[in-house]
Image (cartoon, rainbow, N blue to C red):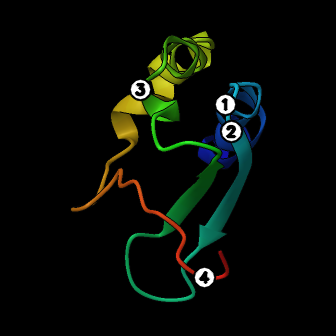
Amino acid sequence: EEFNDWYNTAYIPPYLQVPGVLHARRFTAIEGQPKYLTLYEFADTNVPDTPEWDQARSSNPWSDRIRPIMRHDHGSPGVYRRIFPT
C-alpha cells in the first residue's frame, strides 16, 4: 500500500512537470509479472536524458526509502516509438 501511495503521489507527479513529458499511466497485471507497469509518453525520446528528468528522479526523500524495494525487469526501462496511430 505504501509503495502505491508513494508511486502515485510522490514519484510520478514531478515527472509530469518535466518538459516533454506528455502523460504517465500505471497498470497492474491481472496475472503474471511484472506486477506493475508505468508508461510515460514523451514528446521526444531524449526526455529521460535531461537534467530536469534527473531532478524529478531525486526530488523526494521518500523515494530514497522506497527505491531499494523496486526492481526493473529485463528490458526495463525501455524507450519505444509509437508507430500507430502516427
- Labels 3 and 4 touching (C-beta < 8 A): no
- Return the disc, 3 or 4, that comes first in the chain's sequence: 3
- The residue tagged 4 is 84
The reply, left or right, for residue 5 in relation to residue 83 is right
Question: In the rendered image, which residue does mark 1 sit on?
Answer: 15
- Indicate the amino acid at tag 2: Val
| As drawn, 45 above or below 32 | above
Report, in whole angstroms, how far the alpha carbon at label 4 lies from the one at label 2.
Answer: 19 Å
**Image coordinates for residue 20, horizontal then vertical, percent:** 67, 34
Label 4 crowding class (10 Å Cα cut-off): few <14, some 14-19, many 20+?
Answer: few
Query: Closer to the camera: disc 3 or disc 1?
Result: 3
Crowd around label 2: few <14 · some 14–19 · many ≥20 (10 Å): some
SS category of the residue bearing label 1: helix
Q: Nearer the viewer, mark 1 or mark 2?
A: 2
Residue at x-position 66% and y-position 60%: 26
Q: CA distance from mark 3 to mark 1?
A: 12 Å
Can you name the residue that lies furthest to the bottom here? 31
Query: Which residue is the extreme one toward the left?
Result: 74
Query: Which is nearer the N-term, disc 1 or disc 4?
Result: 1
Q: Which residue is mark 3?
A: 49
Disc 2: which residue? 21
Image spot of residue 25 (x, y percent):
70, 59
In percent of width and height, residue 27 lies at 63, 69
